[in-house]
Image: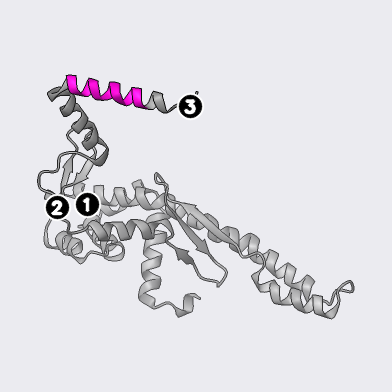
Amino acid sequence: MMKSLPTSKKEALRFLIEDFLERDIEDIIKKNSKIDHGLRQTCERLFQLLSTEPIWLEHIQDRIYLDSAYEKVIRDLHMLMKPIWKKIKEAIFDYILNVIPEKEEEKKVNESYPSDMTPIEYQFRSMLLPFEDQRSYSIKLPQTRLSILMSLERGVLDITKKDLHVVYIFIDFISGIPIDLFGKCEHCSKCIIKLRGRKKYCPGCAAKKYQQDLWASDPKGCKEYQKNRYKSRKDQIPL
């Protein structure tokens, strides 16, 4: 499968895995600190490969920062990606070392015609065989409840973003929304969306606030109302 990848992607993959994720972060920092602009070049390379927002790459290329700033970015990316890569790597080698040999062995066993099967039963089993033992790996993202689903059945890494799709859709949905639409409920501090300019309370607290104001302005009337309401409910209870 690697032969079908462009050379540029192979080299990018080699850099990300061998030069970054498979190395200790202290070794990365130490090695690049000894090279002129080494930390900056590594930081720019990572942004080229990982950032989907060209503005961030332009921002980091157009300005010169202290080495400590580049070092922090490199450390943060390594800390974020290393645990995910560790789980993906475990799944890859589990499939290579365990699943593939099991499948090959099962294929050999099933190539011979079983004496205890009728031709129809054997044909039916042969049809189902490619769909048996479909191994997929659910990989939980560190420090979140999100996960990705990875399958290696086609000989390549098929990764479904699963829960991440919802996150991406939500981010796209709220991107560009004016900040003055957001407010806090004056009673419980939950976030509210101010569809009306004078909105001050969330739905649950609006009713509570109304009751508080009513009792404050007319406590006698409220007591009378509650008394009549209690009496009416009591009269409705069958004896």
Main SS type for the magenta part?
helix
Range of residues picked out in magenta: 220-232
What residue is at 21 percent from the left and 44 percent from the top? 192
Q: Nearer the viewer, residue 96 or 209?
A: 209
Circle 3 or circle 1, nearest the eye: 3
Foreground residue among 192 and 239: 239
Amino acid at circle 3: Pro
Q: Earlier in the sequence, mark 1 or mark 2?
A: 2
Q: Which comes before the other along the chain, label 3 or label 1?
A: 1
> Hey, what amino acid is under mark 2?
Tyr
Using the numbered discs, state the Cα–Cα distance from disc 3 to disc 2 in whole angstroms: 81 Å
In the image, residue 187 lies at what x, y percent?
20, 32
State the residue position of label 1: 70
Say if mark 1 contacts mark 2, CB within 8 Å: yes
Relative height, residue 160 to residue 87 (above, below): below
Q: Residues within 10 Å of mark 3 (few under 14, many from 20)?
A: few
* Residue 131 within the magenta-colored segment of the rendering: no
Q: Nearer the viewer, mark 3 or mark 2?
A: 3
Q: Which mark is residue 238?
A: 3
Q: Position of residue 214 (x, y in %)?
A: 17, 28
- In the image, is residue 29 above or below residue 236? below
| Location of mark 2 (residue) | 65
Residue 59 shows in the view: yes
- Residue 108 found in image quarter: bottom right
Cα distance between the residues tagged 3 and 1: 77 Å
